[in-house]
Amino acid sequence: MSSSPADLVRAFHLAMGLDARSTPTAVAPELAAHRGELLAEEAAEVAEVSVEGPLDKLAHELADVVYVAYGTALVHGIDLDAVIAEIHRSNMTKLGPDGRVARRADGKVLKGDHYEAPDVAGVLRRQGWAPEGSGAPVADEVA
């Protein structure tokens, strides 16, 4: 079996009878809200253990966030790996041509003059996404 998070979460969703789409699709507001609640719950658990640990609990909660994020992407039919690759491409443009990185006082990497915003919409269009207003129906069935 693959160890790819996308493949593992797809196997879970299919085994449990949960939504799993292969084309980016708007979903019913109730389902979207539910997925948001699940993500918020997992993120709160990360915040709770991130400072005081223990490290194994933090690792578990971080993995839960990733698992639920991939599940949310799957519910919406988003190939999250492709989106992450585009975000990575964009983030790497924060590095200046001289190899220098601009940082905020707290260490956050800042966008420099050569920064290129990610084209997430382009990634989704290549996955078959039809933006809202294009006449595409909202999905309410499990694919």
Image: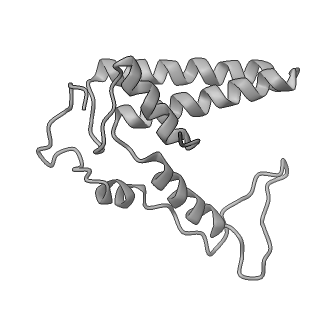
Task: Give residue 143's position: percent from left, percent from top.
Answer: 24, 32
Residue 51 seen:
no
Q: Quadrant of residue 43?
A: top right
Instruction: Name above or below for residue 66 compared with residue 79.
Output: above
User: For the view shown, which residue lies furthest in the front direction?
Assistant: 1
Task: Give residue 39's position: percent from left, percent from top.
Answer: 54, 24
User: For the view shown, which residue lies furthest in the left direction?
Assistant: 135
Q: Is residue 72 left or right of residue 89?
A: left
Q: Is residue 95 left or right of residue 26?
A: right
User: For the view shown, which residue lies furthest in the bottom direction?
Assistant: 98
Instruction: Name above or below for residue 96 compared with residue 14.
Output: below
Task: Give residue 125's position: percent from left, percent from top.
Answer: 29, 57
Which colour assignment does the render follow?
A: one colour
Q: How many marks?
A: 0
Instruction: Report the residue at 71% width, 71% height from top.
Output: 95
Instruction: Report the residue at 57% width, 65% height from top.
Output: 89
Q: Quadrant of residue 51?
A: top right
Instruction: Name above or below for residue 122 compared with residue 57.
Output: below
Instruction: Name above or below for residue 97 compared with residue 82.
Output: below
Task: Give residue 119's position: percent from left, percent from top.
Answer: 43, 61
Residue 137 seen:
yes
Between 130 and 59, the one nearer to me in the picture? 59
Instruction: Report the residue at 60% width, 69% height from top.
Output: 115
Instruction: Report the residue at 47% width, 46% height from top.
Output: 80
Between 22 and 115, the one nearer to me in the picture? 22
